[in-house]
Amino acid sequence: MNKIKESKTLYLRDGRRLGFSDLGDPEGFPMFYFHGFPSSRLEAIAADEIAAKQHVRLIAIDRPGIGLSDMKAHRTLLDWPDDVQELADSLQIDRFSALGISGGGPYLMVCAYKIPQRLVSCGSVCGLGPVGNAWDIQSMSFVNRIGLSLAQNSPFTASVLMAGISSLISLYPEMIIHLMAGDAPECDKIALKDETFKDVMMKAAQESLRTGSAGLSQDLIIYSQDWGFELSDINIHVHLWHGEKDTTLPVFFGKQFEEKIPNNSAVYLPEDGHISIVNHFSDFIEVLMKNRIE
């Protein structure tokens, strides 16, 4: 992998640095990629060759406080589209597609809500939705229930927990694979045996902690709080994919999106979970490219 492609930065108008990777086909149609949690822009390296073959320029962005991106104090979910637009403008990109994976789901949704005029297509893969009471969501992993509940009810405690877990991941990167496997279905455990994929996920997680755990803690708190807008107010088409065997973020969230977003198309994959669904990445890109609104 070309280090220049995977490690770029932009200084935003407010002085913050925004990190991103510029992958796939440099002459292809631009698609912004919003990574999962705990992860970073490096996650998209797993899709670099797929994007190149489909003539897509895949631009993966580090969220504030993660990877190469500087912290933004008191940030909210509604702040994210401003960073995305500023990066797009700097790259001289007018309109683009966007794809959010897992913890990138909320960031995809806020772009669909706030900057629909810039999106020609968008999609969420096993995306996290508004949480409510995490203990009411059947099949969600115990670790996620604890993290989201603490973030909702005791943000400081959640930050302390995140700092502890982050320290362990920094020292023992394979821990992120163990956390992902956890009580995951067999299809996900099989997917996690792929050495190339494992290596990308470990490096992406480590990179998310380049400057500490504060950015991840912000993410966790943002996930658990009110998003600042209603899904019913999204007025563009959103493509949804979710694995029915997902225990990290159960299919409940996909159904929630399908019910509340007025214009959407939902595909549920009965034999896939949270990890194995990445085997369909080529299909996700193909759908977003074929269904562009010019």
Image (spheres, rainbow, N blue to C red):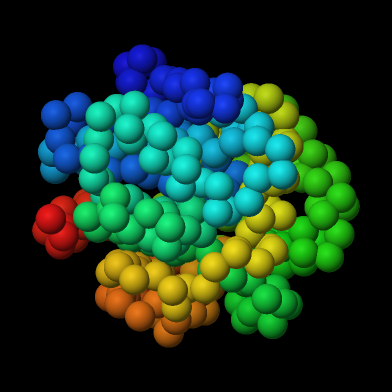
Give coordinates of residue 233: x percent, y percent: 44, 74
Q: Nearer the viewer, residue 114 or 267?
A: 114
Residue 173: x, y in percent? 63, 33
Up-down relation of residue 233 to residue 37 (above or below) = below
Which residue is found at the position 57% from the left and 27% from the top?
A: 14
x and y percent of residue 260 in the render?
44, 81
Which quadrant is home to the N terminus?
top left
Does 139 sit left or right of 271 as displayed?
right
Vertical placement of residue 51 versus 183, above or below: above
Q: Is residue 66 visible?
A: yes
Image coords of residue 257 (percent x, y): 44, 75
Given residues 231 and 103, the one toward you in this image is 231
Image quadrant containing the C terminus: bottom left
Of the pair 193 and 217, the residue shown nearer to us: 217
Question: Residue 288 is drawn in which quadrant?
Answer: bottom left
Say if residue 187 shows up in the picture: no
Residue closest to the eye, 273 or 264: 264
In the image, is residue 273 above or below residue 262?
above
